[in-house]
Image (spheres, rainbow, N blue to C red):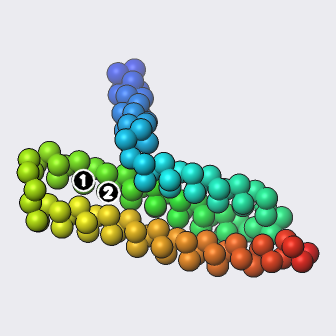
Amino acid sequence: MTNKKDRWSWLKKFGYAFRGLYVSLKEESSLVVHFVIATIVIIMGIILNKYMTSTDWSILVILISIIIGMELLNTAIENVVDIIMFEYNAKAKKIKDVSAAATLILTLASIVVGLVIFIPKIIEYFHG
């Protein structure tokens, strides 16, 4: 059984998470780009909803979540490296570059999957 203090503790944790998202959106332009693209993808899905399956929607939601989550992790990694290293360091740069590359690879894979999902539906939309 949870007491009131535990309940407020969970609410505080959600508050911290939303504050982290807010700060990241405010400071990271690439995260904003991912949110804009995610919004466009969702709007396209709504427009093509007649042709979308629950599997299509599930894949899109999972991919959007993975990309945004990875971008947030990338931001966290870059911030930790910046705190630890006060001046240029080749290994610190490598860590930041590899972290950014992980986001890039996931983004490129998501674009391919998005095209596989949407291209047939767009064709069907205009020919159906």
- Residue 112 occupies which quadrant of the picture? bottom right
- Residue located at (24% from left, 53% from top): 78
- Residue located at (26% from left, 68% from top): 98
Q: Position of residue 42 (x, y in %)?
A: 66, 56
Amino acid carrying mark 2 in the image: Asn
Along the viewing direction, whichever of 2 and 120 lies nearer the viewer: 120
- Left or right, 72 with respect to 40, comes to left
- Residue located at (72% from left, 61% from top): 45
- Residue located at (50% from left, 55% from top): 34
65 vs 18: above or below: below
Question: Mark 2 and mark 1 in contact (Cβ < 8 Å)?
Answer: yes
Circle 1: element type: helix
- Residue 103 occupies which quadrant of the picture? bottom left
> Mark 1 Cα within 10 Å, few/some/many (few <14, many 20+)?
some
Can see residue 1? no
Residue beneath disc 1: 78
Specify the farthest residue to the right: 128
- Left or right, 65 with respect to 78, comes to right
Residue beneath disc 2: 74
Q: Position of residue 20 (x, y in %)?
A: 37, 38
Circle 2: element type: helix
